[in-house]
Structures are given as structure tokens and as C-alpha cells.
Image: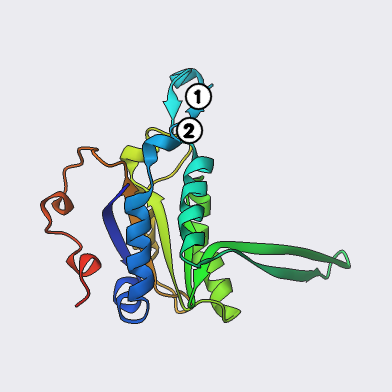
Amino acid sequence: MKIVAIYSFNGGQDFILKYHNNELEEIKEIISLVDAESCKTKKSKEITMKGRMLYSPIDLNKCFKNHLDRRSWNTKVRIKVKTEIRETGETHKGFREMDAVKDKLGLEVQFGKYAFMVYNVAAKMTIFANQGLINSGIEIVPMLSLANEMSSGVSYFEQMKTDLEMRGVSDIDIPVLIIGIAQRGKNIKNRLKLGQQNLPLIKKK
């Protein structure tokens, strides 16, 4: 797969380049090694594209996890959570989970519904930072071109960037770098194709 676009939320790109450049380089390498075509294993049952072979989020996540494990990332980091419901006298217990963490850099690989993408940045990463487990995060999401070849309802970089820009930054947000990825060989017209975009992501200042 390949990186098509990035969005630096709350200074995420500069912070990660400064404090987590080695981990960023590993993530860039992993993205380049993921073979998207081997994950085109889901036969659609949806009426609008019945019988069409689609990219499987489960298989894509497995590919990422395998590469992360080989590079000693702590995958599936889980914390316990609970809250008291005063009105009912009950205690609600559960957990929150992050795809991977290394040296206080959190990573989420998201090929799911739109709500999960924004939740990761606006809530989950903040919770993990409050627990002292991370100080910044990276969110890997599909570009629209990739989402169009997945089941309906999968969100994408362009949509997420729009809403984060419109939302703005809160004083509790942590630095996050959003990375939009697509299949290799996909003809996407943008400056990255010409080697003119995201130069700080390619080479540290």
C-alpha cells in the first residue's frame, strides 16, 4: 500500500517527527509492505455490488498486526474503565483497546465505520494519554478510492479531515497524525504522486 495524504491534527506531524521519528519510519515501511491485493477476499452480498470481490478490513488489519508484531510494537493494548451510575446504583465496567503502542506513540488502523475514526482521535487517544500510556498518536485510514472497494459504510480520509478541520482543536486533544492510504498502482491525482507533498513525512527536517 502507499501513503497518499496526511493531516496533522494539533501539531501531530511536528511532534511525531521530533519525538517518534523512528516509530514513524517503521509505520511508513509497514504501509509499503502491506499487500492490499492479498486482502481482497470478501465477496460482497450487498445488492448494489453483489458478488464483487472487496478488500477485507479483517485481513488488512491482520497484515498490519503481523508487521507490527515483528517490530516489537505492543499490539492490542487494553485498559479497564468503570463509572458509577448514581441514578441506578450500578457500576458500569468495561475496557478500551488500542491497536498498538510503542514508546508512548499510539497507533490505530481503522477500516471501519465513520464514528470509530473520529472517536479514536477525539476520545480514545485522549483517554490513553490521561493514563500515561501515550503522548501522541497516528491514525491510519483509507482514502476514498480504497473505501469505494470495501463494504458500504466504511469511512475515509477526506471525510475525517473535513470534520476535524471544522471541529477545531480542544485544549485536551493530543498531537495526532492522520495518514490516508490506498492501493499501490491506483491512479490518484495529487501532489504526492509528483513527490511534492508531505516532504517532512518523507524526510525529517
- Give how far across and how far down residue 172 sits, in percent: 49, 77
Is residue 10 visible to the viewer in this orientation of the structure? no
Position of residue 60 measured from the top left corner of the image (x, y, whole percent): 47, 44
Give the colouring mode of the picture.
Answer: rainbow
Per the image, label 2 sits on a secondary structure element best described as loop
The crowding category of the residue bearing disc 1, from other C-alpha atoms within 10 Å (few below 14, some 14 to 19, many at least 20), is some
Q: Is residue 186 above or below residue 19?
A: above
Residue drawn at the location 14% of the way across and 52% of the way down: 191
Whether residue 99 sits left or right of residue 145 in the image: it is right
Evaluate whether residue 91 shows in this view: yes
Pointer 1 or 2: first along the chain: 1
Give neighbour class at mark 2: few <14, some 14-19, many 20+ (Cα, 10 Å).
Answer: many
Image quarter of residue 202: bottom left
Query: Mark 2: which amino acid?
Result: Ser
Specify the amino acid type for callout 1.
Ser
Residue at 47% across, 18% down: 51
Residue to which mark 2 is pinned: 151
127 displayed left or right of 190? right
Position of residue 124 relative to residue 19, above or below, is above
Furthest residue to the front? 70
Helix, strand or loop status at disc 1: loop
Q: Are marks 1 and 2 in contact (CB under 8 Å)?
A: yes
Q: Position of residue 98 (x, y in %)?
A: 57, 63
| Vertical side of 198 occupied by 52: above or below | above
Q: Quadrant of the C terminus?
A: bottom left
> Which residue is the site of mark 1?
44
* Residue at the spot 62% in from the left edge and 62% down from the top edge: 97
Quarter where residue 40 is shown: top left
What is the distance, in whole Å, between disc 1 and disc 2 at their CAs? 7 Å
